[in-house]
Amino acid sequence: MTWNISYAYGPGSEGDERYQPKSPKHFETTLQAMGDTIKKLDPDIVLLQEVDFYSKRSHFENQLDHLARRSGLLYRSGIVTWDRMYVPYPGLRPYRQFGRIRSGGGILSKTQIEPIQNDLLAKPRENSGIYNYFYVQRFLQMVKIRGMNLCNLHLEAFSSDNRDLHLVRLQDRLTEYGLDLAGGDFNGEACIRAELQEAFQTHKPPKGTFPSDAPLQPLDQFVVKRESFSNIRLEVPDTGTLSDHLPVLLVAESSCKA
């Protein structure tokens, strides 16, 4: 399963005109509902994006630990990609600004997780240096679980050129690390070049996943090694506006050996 949880904020989390700071109770309630949802869906592995580890905007909760405890998937591995003492965004009013940020992604699993490699991806070259200093960094998080080499990912959203660079890095990693599956928030199409299509296949959900209150864009997808999985189907559970994304559940038979 993959889910961009938007640090348990919901629609408006990116700092648009809807953004206003929310109470500790909001985040507590939302994280509990997310954990309960994961437990009910009962996935073996969950790939998470936009997880806060110690951020003012979400009241300094380690959200990966919270979701692990609530869902019962106690094996977890995090990647911190955005770590700034103060982020002066959004707007000019300090009470609305994110402030201290420590955020990234994470993986939950029913079984042990063995880290392989974390890639912090390039920031947009068209941005100024000072803008990029505060700008969120995207990632590839590669691990081994039960004989499978997996990648949790979050690619560029606001620069098409930079997103293309991220897709190139992902496709290189598919072969370099023998990945069986890559999933997450692609912020667009999960494309692979022609020479990889014999070995790998992209899988798009049957309906949109973003924004959760009017889901039209299937941003959350998978790339799967053909010989590793069969009888693949994707489902989009209706989780309302817990996040600004809906989760995607991939159900398949695996030929990977633990």
Image (cartoon, rainbow, N blue to C red):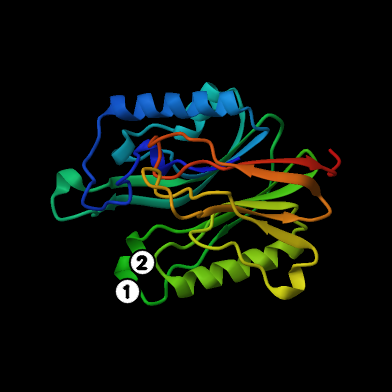
Q: How many marks?
A: 2
**Residue 161: % across, % down:** 47, 75
Residue for point 39% across, 65% down: 158
Residue 106 quadrant: top right
**Which residue reaches farthest left?**
93
**Nearest to the observer: residue 45 or residue 101:** 45
| 116 up-or-down from 5: above or below | below
Please name the residue that numbered disc 2 is placed on. Answer: 132
**Nearest to the observer: residue 30 or residue 175:** 30
Secondary structure beneath label 1: loop
Q: Quadrant of the N terminus?
A: top right
**Residue 225: % across, % down:** 77, 56
| 194 up-or-down from 44: above or below | below
**Residue 51: % across, % down:** 45, 41
> How many other residues sit within 10 Å of disc 2, few (<14), some (14-19) or many (≥20)?
some
| 119 up-or-down from 116: above or below | below
**Residue 246: % across, % down:** 47, 42
| 241 up-or-down from 219: above or below | above
**Of the numbered discs in the image, which one, if any, rests on residue 184?**
none
Q: Is residue 87 left or right of residue 139?
A: left
Please name the residue that numbered disc 1 is placed on. Answer: 128
Residue for point 50% across, 55% down: 219
Residue 131 quadrant: bottom left
Label 1 amino acid? Ser
Secondary structure beneath label 2: helix
Residue for point 73% across, 46% down: 232
Residue 27 quadrant: top left
Q: Quadrant of the C terminus?
A: top right
**Nearest to the observer: residue 241 or residue 117:** 241
Q: Tell whether label 1 touches label 2 (CB within 8 Å).
A: yes
Label 2 amino acid? Asn
